[in-house]
Amino acid sequence: MITWKNLDTVDAYQELLKVARVNLAEVMSGENGAERVKKYSVPMTEGLVYNYAAKQIDDVVLAALAKLAEETELTEKFEALYNGEVVNTGEKRLVLHHMTRGQLGDAVIADGGDKRTFYTDQQKKIAVFANKVHNGEITNAAGEKFTTVVQIGIGGSDLGPRAMYLALENWAKVNNTFKMEAKFISNVDPDDAAAVLNTIDVAHSLFVLVSKSGTTLETLTNESFVKDALKNAGLDPAKHMIAVTSETSPLAKSDDYLEAFFMDDYIGGRYSSTSAVGGAVLSLAFGPEVFAQFLEGAAEADKTAKNKDLLANPAMLDALIGVYERNVLGYQNTAVLPYSQGLSRFPAHLQQLDMESNGKSVNRFGEPVDYPTGPVIFGEPGTNGQHSFYQLLHQGTDIVPLQFVGFRNNQMCRDVLIQDSTSQQKLCANVAAQIVAFACGKSDEDRNKNFEGGRPSSIIIGDQLNPKTLGALLAHFENKVMFQGFVWNINSFDQEGVQLGKVLAKRVLAHETDGALKVYSDLLNI
Amino acid sequence: MITWKNLDTVDAYQELLKVARVNLAEVMSGENGAERVKKYSVPMTEGLVYNYAAKQIDDVVLAALAKLAEETELTEKFEALYNGEVVNTGEKRLVLHHMTRGQLGDAVIADGGDKRTFYTDQQKKIAVFANKVHNGEITNAAGEKFTTVVQIGIGGSDLGPRAMYLALENWAKVNNTFKMEAKFISNVDPDDAAAVLNTIDVAHSLFVLVSKSGTTLETLTNESFVKDALKNAGLDPAKHMIAVTSETSPLAKSDDYLEAFFMDDYIGGRYSSTSAVGGAVLSLAFGPEVFAQFLEGAAEADKTAKNKDLLANPAMLDALIGVYERNVLGYQNTAVLPYSQGLSRFPAHLQQLDMESNGKSVNRFGEPVDYPTGPVIFGEPGTNGQHSFYQLLHQGTDIVPLQFVGFRNNQMCRDVLIQDSTSQQKLCANVAAQIVAFACGKSDEDRNKNFEGGRPSSIIIGDQLNPKTLGALLAHFENKVMFQGFVWNINSFDQEGVQLGKVLAKRVLAHETDGALKVYSDLLNI
């Protein structure tokens, strides 16, 4: 029987508070530093490695974290989740995104069927459809092939799939699996849809409308915008649109769509990249085989997350080091810094994944908690960030923990040799240099040029960003966020914080406002 | 005579610490709230308004901030800056970015000439060049017009110009001033350059190499990458490239470029959008007249920043409210949330502008300061953010001050009516709703659905995002950051924090490493 308790009532947490702090600049210097880098490293999957040598940890801290993992029953809670317990207590729902890419435990029967079968059936249906689009069995009314796929969705129906598309776009081009260009329309700002429509040939475009409920106002508004454009071009919208939605949504069995693919209430938007939400657009863009490889990478990472040994479970370890930084060391933010241009929007996706999951002030029973929960997440790709906000990271008054990602090889196999090194070598040299600069610093008599060091980071290193490593990377962070939610005793799978704004926006549009809201509405000419 | 002193030695700051806190949820409710929204509002320029009603201020706090502004001599320091004092004490340089768009005070003579004349001469030279490119006097070797301009630069040579380009791209298309498409190559990751080159027709592309020193390794590497591509296409790189650099740089008088335009050491990279760094690419993309309007908007905002009356100086007011939030209320971050798709990368630019300027731990004399300085800045456009990280902003355990931007009209003049409102109305309704939701909250017996409120925000409201309002918006934030640097007594115009990483990266590439750095280098196969 699992016990859910607040972090500050956990004995191991009280012990953790008393553990001596590690002086990072000191331990990362000299040969001791070299030994740490070799030692504090754990294989993930798909050749990825999570290296945490530059975190403020040592064997004593790790032992305390292992106790914390044990006492908070993290792997048991994960087991309960994938075996189909109602872990999303607020909305009284199962949490089954892992099942979109594998079966980690028991069969889960819900809504009258086996859920793994449900998800794989959708994948198969998508694969058949995508193949037909690619081989010209499904075409526009003029019998011409579709060349572009446009995802219409917002939040989890946008950020994850978009980040994954960008991460694989150039890889797919080089590896001859690039089938269709993908575009994304998300914002209710009409300029978003208008700008995307300006760049595509609507006659050869297939639109994927994504809304679990079928009622997301931004998405329905953009659908209407797109339908107008199709009609204005003399085209039948129903021949250019598919839907990804839940079986019970108004979009599910509508003649407005060529086809509908299903997700369900057990997949949160921000966890839906491996469901039909990511599956439709990614299978159309790169082919179903590439999407299958992506799922495979994620499934392998999920298996690693079952490991009860903290030091062999990179997602759990990453999670607990993050809790230590947040609750013991008192750091408020985490920066995600991928040294890979393909991951340009990966930080934006993690921002949603993490902040929407763990930005909560009440525990899973609805009682206020007395300790900090999810941090603010931000980031941009290195080396760009180095020439931007790294100044504050190196010399600012607050310490920001860093999460680097780096690959030995680039995706596009084109490079140039300048000053005896390739661009890829320069990229890798920079990330190595940054880790050490942040950790060790460098003293200088000119205090303006002084670096105190002691700024913690971890790095995930891989050979190349490809479908499998991307899947593994995504699942790693999903599982990290899940474990942190368990430690904080919060429900990481609802998002009640987005509701009030929706309610008030409706009131503004209905002109049912008073007080400050009315004056703001007037100022904005609504 | 100006006195530079640390914030904690300023009497007005000690008074500010004692001022009673404002209960935001309370004061923003009911008719009192409506009155606040009307009262706490200051016109900027170009029809923009800065409304700070939803900040934790009242007349008492404002009076204390006015005293702080006076005692720290903010407008006097600004005056010293634009009159040519060496305000960048670390690098012993003048700070003259305001002069790229106007003359606020005395003539400044440096490097043997009048600096205002120098900057306007460069603008004129760029205008002549851009017009010749547009009318076909300057073409490729085959006598064909250039259709695309590609900026090669990183940090300030990339983020600002890119954000400004994206902000005006669709406006220019609708207003028939769109001349050439612009692309940007920044990252040393070779996939960045390769991907951009894949999307353009190099034979009709003009490349703008931007590096003040002419030695930025990332930029020179990408230049070489591009030159290879031009040569492989049988083209002469020297006929496809211009340079933006300082007069003393190796790029200044090289035959490798069709033309060179100049900036100087008095313009920091992150303040260079209104110099030749932004001028070349924006004049080529939209025409010199549009760039001139952009400068005009910035110049008008600069004039407003001279106002000694705090309540009539929106940049100074914004700055001081930010200091109050950072140093008295203890908030670490600021989120920038533009409700305008055109401003999609504006937060990324502000992230550099703010964090690189004020992420410092020593004062302008090189002595450590004992108080927090620049905050972490992050943000994404609304309504996208609402479906992503707003959960944490509404219900997370830390309070994050918010900076909204909204416009009554969209840029592209295409819209759709759904459920009795346009998309633009929905967009505006959402930002109005969010401000009130954050400020007032809403209590609910179900604590999971409870919103405490008390989360402060401001909003800048305008009619439309266009060259003038964009210029005004940019200058507002530049001046805000400058004033905050003055209050914190730091040098906002150097960036020594980026140096150590560069030095270590060079060592890695030269294989002159030991300890942890060597092991990381090995792990990354360098």
Image: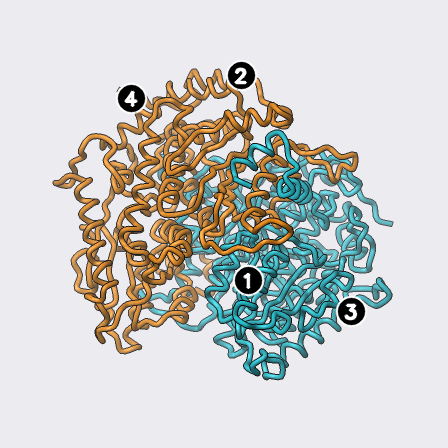
Chain colours: A cyan, B orange
Mark 1: secondary structure: strand
Q: Give the residue at mark 4.
A: B2
In the rendered image, the vertical position of residue A277 relative to residue A512, given as above or below: below
Mark 4: secondary structure: loop
Give the quarter of the figure containing the N terminus of chain B: top left
Question: Mark 2, residues whose alpha carbon is within 10 Å: few (<14), some, or many (≥20)?
Answer: few
Query: Where residue B263 sits: x, y (%)?
Result: 24, 48
Q: Which is closer to the viewer, label 3 or label 2?
A: 3
The one nearer the camera, A333 or B511, is: A333
In the rendered image, the vertical position of residue B60 relative to residue A502, given as above or below: above
Give the quarter of the figure containing the C terminus of chain B: bottom left
Mark 2: secondary structure: helix
Does mark 2 fall on the same chain as mark 3?
no
Does mark 4 fall on the same chain as mark 3?
no
Residue A120: name its quadrant. bottom right
CA separation in Å, label 2 and label 4:
26 Å
Q: Give the residue at mark 3.
A: A118
Does mark 4 fall on the same chain as mark 2?
yes
Mark 3: secondary structure: helix
The one nearer the camera, B118 or A377, is: B118
Q: Give the residue at mark 2.
A: B18
Residue at (60% x, 38% y) in the render: A329
Question: Mark 1, residues whose alpha carbon is within 10 Å: few (<14), some, or many (≥20)?
Answer: many
Among numbered discs 2 and 4, the one appearing first in the sequence: 4
> Is label 1 in contact with label 3 (beta carbons under 8 Å)?
no
Does mark 1 fall on the same chain as mark 2?
no
